[in-house]
Amino acid sequence: MREMTSPTDAAARATPAAAQQPDWPDPARVDRVRRRLRALPPPVAPAAVDRLRGRLAEVAHGRALLLQGGDCAETFAGNTPAHIRANLRTLLHTATLLEVASGLPVVPVGRVAGQYAKPRSNPYDTDGLPSYRGDLVNATTPTAAARTPDPARLLRAHADARATLGVLDAVAAETRTELFAGHEALLLDYEIPLTRRAPDGARRGLSGHFLWIGERTRQPGGAHVEFARGIANPVGVKVGPGTTPAEVLAYADALDPHRSPGRLTLISRMGADRVADALPPLVTAVAAAGHPVIWLCDPMHGNTVVANSGHKTRHFDTILAEIRGFFAVHAALGTHPGGLHLEFTGDDVTECLGGSQDLRDTDLPTRYDTACDPRLNARQTLDLTCLIAKTLLTPTTPRKPLNIA
């Protein structure tokens, strides 16, 4: 996207076309909001972005793990200090368990302070209304007015992100830990105005420390890949079972041409029944090409089903099965399983099935609070982590490591 070298909105809207963007009713108003965003202080600091990239270099070298986790979709109303603290507490508890089990430091990155936009498979819902695309774009209320994309929400998201980061910084100070924030860089009318060029000439996306490209916007040569190519942040790309080795090599070549450890994370979201077959060719191709990427397991998005009650849900056992499959692939190939990408909340919700609470279909309506996809609750998250810890503590005999030098 040409705004990587030009400050004008007209240039920023140049080709390539961006997928999954809202149909704004008043483009001139969007341009005014973008100009206001460019004038506001960015949510995160460049030094923190660079510090995270250094931490992730250790993950890429196999000397640390990465843990990302938090809400599927943040909401303006739901992001209270109590909710943010509960999520961060769950993130840190999970990180501690993984650290003890693996013997490696864990880098915690919350899905916070920017996870306000969501891609949709259909632009309209079953009632014929525009789909809810996250609080960054419109509201969940099922009316035409509420579902009309409103660019003023970009300014509200900026303010809420800064408030959320204030809570994150307070928790980090209280616990004497490093905490970072990441989200899917989906809505480019929000992301591009919050990029800044530093004295060293590098541009950083300062809406968050870590930004990733989702499964629906990862087109090689597309606008989202082009945006990520122009910033110095650590970046990620979600890859599903339909991803080919040629595609992952194209992402690696575009986003990490200098083979810099910590720059690129490939986030595997295969599904429990596909991970054993779909992941190995991708890992093998990237390793053979010498790209020092981080491989992360997202066991949530490939395992979503619809319950008899009509609620979208995920089963604890299926989530665990994909994680175990992910670790087994890396053990067999002699590569480093870089960590986990989970959707969870510290709140006592009933959105995912199973776990020690044995949540069932009939329990889902009790506290089904998510704005989009189902999240593990705090108990389920810790149950899952304890079982993963046992996997990490179980001795394995990996094959000869792949040559990635």
Image (cartoon, rainbow, N blue to C red):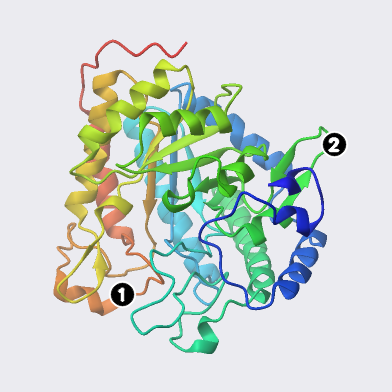
> Which of the two discs, 1 and 2, sits closer to the camera?
2
At horizontal 46% and vertical 28% (from top left) the residue drawn is 249
At horizontal 39% and vertical 68% (from top left) the residue drawn is 122
| Amino acid type of the residue tagged 2 in the rendering | Pro
321 over 61 or under it: above or below: below
Dot 2 alpha-carbon crowd within 10 angstroms: few under 14, some 14 to 19, many 20 or more: few
| Amino acid type of the residue tagged 1 in the rendering | Tyr
Please say if the residues under marks 1 and 2 sit with CB atoms less than 8 Å apart. Answer: no
Percent coordinates x, y for residue 77 in the rendering: 53, 77
The answer to whether residue 179 shows anywhere in this view is: no
At horizontal 54% and vertical 50% (from top left) the residue drawn is 182
In terms of depth relative to the viewer, which is nearer, 127 or 261?
Answer: 127
149 over 67 or under it: above or below: below
Dot 1 alpha-carbon crowd within 10 angstroms: few under 14, some 14 to 19, many 20 or more: some
Q: Is label 1 in a helix, a strand or a loop? A: loop
Q: Which residue corresponds to mark 2?
A: 199
Residue lying furthest right = 199
Percent coordinates x, y for residue 150 in the rendering: 62, 77
Instruction: Say which mark, if any, is on residue 368.
Output: 1
